[in-house]
Amino acid sequence: MSPALPLFVVSTKVNTADISKRVKAGELQRVVQGLYTRDMRPADRLSILVGQHIWEIVGLLCPGAIIVDRTAFEARPADDGSIFVVSGRTSDLAIPGFRIRTRTGICTAQDLPFMGGALRMSSAGRIVLDNMAPSRARSGLSRTAGMTAIEGYLERQLRLHGDTALNRIRDEAKSVATLIGREAEMDKLDRLCGALLGTQLSPAGVTAPTAVARIDGAPYDDDRVAMFERLWRKLHSEHFPMLPEPATAEARANVAFFESYFSNFIEGTEFEVSEAENIVFANQIPKERPQDAHDILGTWRVASDEGDLAAAIDTFESFEAALKRRHSAIMEGRPEKTPGIYKEIANRAGTYEFVAPDLVRGTLKRGYEFLRALADPFARAAFAMFVVSEVHPFLDGNGRVARLMMNGELARSRQARIIIPTIMRNDYLDGLRGLSANGNAESYLRILAVCRSWSAPMPWDSFPLTKAVMMRTNAYLRHHEAVSENKRLTVPTPALISAIEIADVQASASRPSTFG
């Protein structure tokens, strides 16, 4: 035995005496019968060392073993420390923090070398077949992951990688099924793959939600649904201020104008407020920018339609109808963007990919199920906007329709809407990105709350006064202007509003005092 000891030493007939000597000298300590380590940490902390080198240890104690069953499927030890292998050992082996659980079996040509060849890892086909087999746990977790887990796994492979991936797994399973005695499981797998691919009827007893949804024709993106659930849990436990909407129709019409103006500005449709007034109230469509003008006009028509916004949305079908109807109105000036029709090609923002076209309806439906379980109007608004934004169901106009769905939830409850002024554009988009990327709901919700606390006290009954107050609260500043001038959005206080002389703003009025 070399004086330079490896981290772990397996005892043999040749080195037993030397190991015994080194144990007495304090150079080695026993991990488990037959395995020693030169790491002399306290024995009650050996499980940490074992966890850091678990696969190396399995290879030393069970050379040539095949990682199988639940362990191969999950690619890690089970939560109770179980590691399932096919091995020549005839009994399980307990080591600090773990238990190697053995069974008989054979190695196939498809099983992959693992840990430098000391172990083998089950092939994808074998993993699926083994984990479809029923098992009952004598102690700890069951040996196999079970049918529900495999159904979900196969649907995910199909969703992420297409038909080719599913067919490859099935072909690989066929090549080993007889060798490992899994003919019955192979028959189930064949029928399940056919159902997922739409080429066969569904076998009885499919239970994985994603697989059931795909077989029923409404597949969804389970990663996005997990995002929705996390946000829902956050919102479900929160209580937000109740801020009533303006009392007069005139004021609510002014709200709708500025909601439309700022919502389009966020998307890069930039007009001066006076230009937007001419588009909306005088129907003056600039010849050089007709589509941009129709974007503002379409958004305003939805935002100002109190009957549509107040209509009940108590089923997914009514939610979907409102979403398509509002998108169609927003994008009516861009027929090439297929207004009101879900996308047929994938869309992205930079490198971030939104929900795939075939998963749009199913993902929206799952999102709606969480939405309907929220009672607070602000919570519903924030949730609805994120769902639509994250799915991005249309070729274009997704941000605008998402914000309309948000404010529709508030308008239906007679609550003040959330208007996102130009100065808050970057913060708002960063909040959305943070929620998508790492689940940071706090920043997203804070931005929406700030924007609502700014818009709620506006003097909406006076259009020219509102414009002036917006100027004084820095609402029109672009992000770089705000940074360079060291300015931020400020809340319009009664003192600020009263300090602005009405006479000074009358000249800026460029629309009739009431809407037709």
Image (cartoon, rainbow, N blue to C red):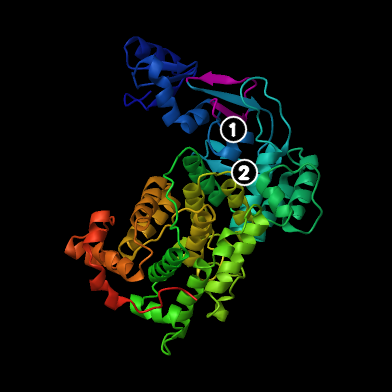
Please give the residue where the numbered disc 1 appears in the rendered image.
65
247 vs 313, left or right, is: left
Q: Which of 126 and 311 is in front in this view?
A: 311
Q: In this view, does 143 lie above or below 108?
A: above
Q: Is residue 195 magenta?
A: no
- Do the numbered discs 2 and 1 sit on residues whose CB atoms are within 8 Å? no
Which residue is pictured at 58% across the width and 64% down the height? 307
Residue 395 lies in what quarter of the image?
Answer: bottom right
Which residue is pictured at 47% across the width and 49% down the height? 378
The percent coordinates of residue 79 (x first, y second) are 54, 29
148 vs 370, left or right, is: right
Q: Describe the element under mark 2 as helix, strand or loop.
A: loop
The percent coordinates of residue 490 (x first, y second) are 26, 56
Which residue is pictured at 39% across the width and 53% down the height? 448
Q: What stretch is highlighted in magenta?
A: 79-96
Please give the residue where the numbered disc 2 appears in the rendered image.
111
Q: Is residue 489 above or below residue 117?
A: below
Question: Which quadrant: the N terminus?
Answer: top left
Residue extending farthest to the bottom is 287
Q: Does residue 353 appear in this view?
A: no
Q: Which amino acid does label 1 sit on?
A: Ala
